[in-house]
Image (cartoon, helix red, strand yellow):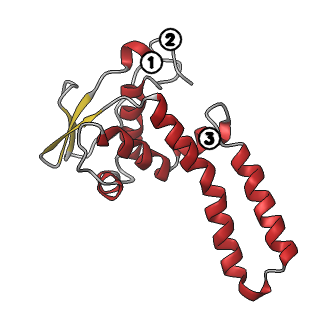
Amino acid sequence: MVTKAADAAKAPLVITHEGREYTLSPLEFRDLAEIERWASALPFEHARRQIAALGNMATPEARQQILANATERSDKLNLSTPEFVRVLSSIEGVIYMLFLSLRKDNPEVTREQAADLVSLDNLEEWQQRLDKVSGLTGDDDEVRPTQSPESTTSANEST
C-alpha cells in the first residue's frame, strides 16, 4: 500500500477551501491504527442495527449468527486486506482519514466539519490529496486532480 516514494511524499499540504486554509498532515502509524480500530468496529455497528431492526423477532440463534458474521468481517479489516482498502475508499473512510489528517494542525476541526468539506463533486480529489500527503499514491506516484469545485484549491499546487 505504501509506495517507494512514500517517504518523499509525506509532507504537509496546505489546502484553501471556501476561503479558509487547512493543513493536511501525513497520517502516521498511530493514525492508521486508529483507522483500523474504527474500520474493525463497523461490522458490529451494522450488526447492532440489524438486531435492532429485527426487534422481538431476533432469536438468540439469529443474534448469534449476526454477531458471528460481524466478527468474521471485522477480522478481515486490517491494513493488509482489500476489504480494508475498500473501507478507506468509502465516503466515510475518506472523511475519517481527512479528519485525522486535519486535526494535527487544526485541532479545532471536528469530524463533522471534516465531513462538511467533502462532497460527491470533490470526494476523489480529497482522497487523492490524502493519498499524496500520506504517501499512499499507488503505483504511479502522481495525484491527478479531478474536476475541482471552485471553492477547493491547493496553495501547494500550481493553478
Q: Is residue 147 left or right of residue 84?
A: left
The residue beneath circle 3 is 84
Mark 1 residue type: Asp
Badge 1 crowding class, 10 Å Cα cut-off, few under 14, some 14 to 19, many 20 or more, is some
Residue 99 percent location from the top left of the image: 36, 46
Mark 3 residue type: Phe
| Placement of the C terminus among the 4 image quadrants | top left
The residue beneath circle 1 is 141
| Placement of the N terminus among the 4 image quadrants | top right
Q: Secondary structure at mark 3?
A: helix
Residue 118 percent location from the top left of the image: 34, 51
Q: Secondary structure at mark 2?
A: loop
Relative to 60, does residue 70 appear above or below in the rendering?
above
Total numbered circles: 3
| Label 3 close to label 2 by CB (< 8 Å) | no
Mark 2 residue type: Lys
Badge 2 crowding class, 10 Å Cα cut-off, few under 14, some 14 to 19, many 20 or more, is some
Relative to 55, does residue 45 appear above or below in the rendering?
above
- Could you give the CA–CA distance between mark 3 and mark 1, rounded to whole angstroms? 21 Å
Q: Is residue 92 left or right of residue 16?
A: right
Residue 100 percent location from the top left of the image: 38, 42
| Label 3 close to label 1 by CB (< 8 Å) | no
Which is in the foreground here, disc 1 or disc 2?
A: 2
- Could you give the CA–CA distance between mark 3 and mark 2, rounded to whole angstroms? 21 Å
In the displayed orientation, state which residue is furthest to the left: 19
Question: Residue drawn at (78%, 58%), measured in percent from left and top?
Answer: 69
Question: Residue drawn at (45%, 36%), measured in percent from left and top?
Answer: 31
Q: Is residue 41 left or right of residue 55?
A: left
Which label number is shown at residue 59? none
The residue beneath circle 2 is 4
